[in-house]
Amino acid sequence: MRRHEFQPGRLIAGLALVVAGVLYLVGTTGEADLPWFAVIPITMGGLTLAALVGLVTYAVRRDRRDRITESSDR
């Protein structure tokens, strides 16, 4: 399998959804007294954080790519 670039935004989104799913599962089985609507803020917060990290990652990579292109043109 070829290596691909690391995408931290997708990692955070996946972790947030896994945490929300596990909390919902634990609440459903009766192990914890978790209100059903607590999963929604966790999911939305995780996806928002993932979007911000994705935007920062894109900006950093674009800046780095532009610097490499600019230095090779000289």
Image (cartoon, rainbow, N blue to C red):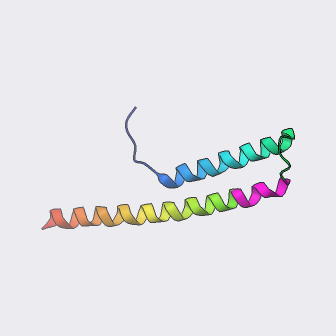
Left or right of 11 in this view: 46 = right
Question: What percent of the width, then of the height, locates residue 6?
Answer: 42, 48
| Residue in view at x 43 percent, y 62 percent | 58
The image quadrant where one finds the N terminus is top left
- The stretch drawn in magenta includes residue 10: no
- Which segment did they paint magenta? 35-42
Residue 16 x %, y %: 64, 51
Residue at position x 60%, y 48% from top? Answer: 15
In the rendered image, the vertical position of residue 59 relative to residue 40, given as above or below: below
**Residue under the image location 59 percent in, 52 percent down:** 13
Majority secondary structure of magenta residues: helix
**35 and 12: which is toward the camera:** 35
| Res 22 → quadrant | top right
Does residue 44 sit above or below 12 in this rendering?
A: below
Taking the image as shown, residue 46 lies to the left or right of residue 38, namely left
Identify whether 13 is placed above or below 62.
Answer: above
Based on the picture, tell me whether residue 40 belongs to the magenta stretch: yes
**Residue 61: x percent and y percent?**
36, 61
The answer to whether 62 is drawn above or below residue 15 in the figure is below
Which x, y percent locates residue 60?
37, 64
Image quarter where the C terminus lies is bottom left
Question: Between residues 48 and 72, which one lies in front from this camera angle?
Answer: 48
Q: Is residue 14 left or right of residue 27?
A: left
- Where residue 18 sits, quadrant-wise, is top right
